[in-house]
Amino acid sequence: MHFRCYARTLNLCVTADINRVMKNSVELSLVHVSVMNKCNILWYLNGQPKSAEIIHNLLENALSKPGETRWNSLYDSLRQISNIKKNILNLIITLEINKKSLREQDFNYI
């Protein structure tokens, strides 16, 4: 007999519900896409050797990028970004990503 992981099943249910809410709320969807795009820029830069070194030096560790096979990785990655809020200004200036950087309202969303 095969038993699914309850955490994985719960994650699938929540993900489906969130996707439904996003479809019904254009405003929420726009905010979500904007915040995720800004986070994706940080995750992308973390994968580039020169930027990764800067990120590691400023934050004293690397940023974790979410993965498809790890069901809680998005939560962990967003929590990590939320925790670097105090260092984000230095990171933005050093990486020269000011126009596409996370703002206060983005951290509130995260």
Image (tube, rainbow, N blue to C red):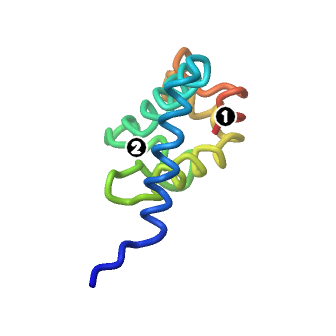
Asked which secondary structure carries label 2, the reply is helix
- The residue beneath circle 2 is 52
Direction from residue 107 to residue 98 in the image, left or right? left
Residue 69: % across, % down: 32, 58
15 and 41: which is toward the camera? 15
Callout 2 amino acid: Ala
Instruction: Please count the marks in the image.
Output: 2
Which residue corresponds to the image point at 42% horizontal and 64% vertical from the top-left? 8
Residue 10: % across, % down: 50, 61
- Of the image marks 2 and 1, the number of the one nearer the N terminus: 2
Placement of the C terminus among the 4 image quadrants: top right
39 and 94: which is toward the camera? 39
Which residue corresponds to the image point at 71% horizontal and 26% vertical from the top-left? 105
Image quadrant where residue 84 sits: top right
Do callouts 2 and 1 mark residues in contact (Cβ within 8 Å)? Answer: no
3D distance between C-alphas at marks 2 and 1: 25 Å
Is label 2 or label 1 in front? 1
Residue 109, label in figure: 1
Q: Residue furthest top?
A: 99
Which residue corresponds to the image point at 53% horizontal and 29% vertical from the top-left? 22
Q: Residue furthest front?
A: 1
Placement of the N terminus among the 4 image quadrants: bottom left
Residue 82: % across, % down: 64, 44
* Above or below 49: residue 67: below
Q: Residue furthest left?
A: 1
* Above or below 6: residue 82: above
Crowd band around label 2 with a 10 angstrom C-alpha radius: few (<14), some (14–19), many (20+):
many
Which residue corresponds to the image point at 72% horizontal and 34% vertical from the top-left? 108
Callout 1 amino acid: Tyr
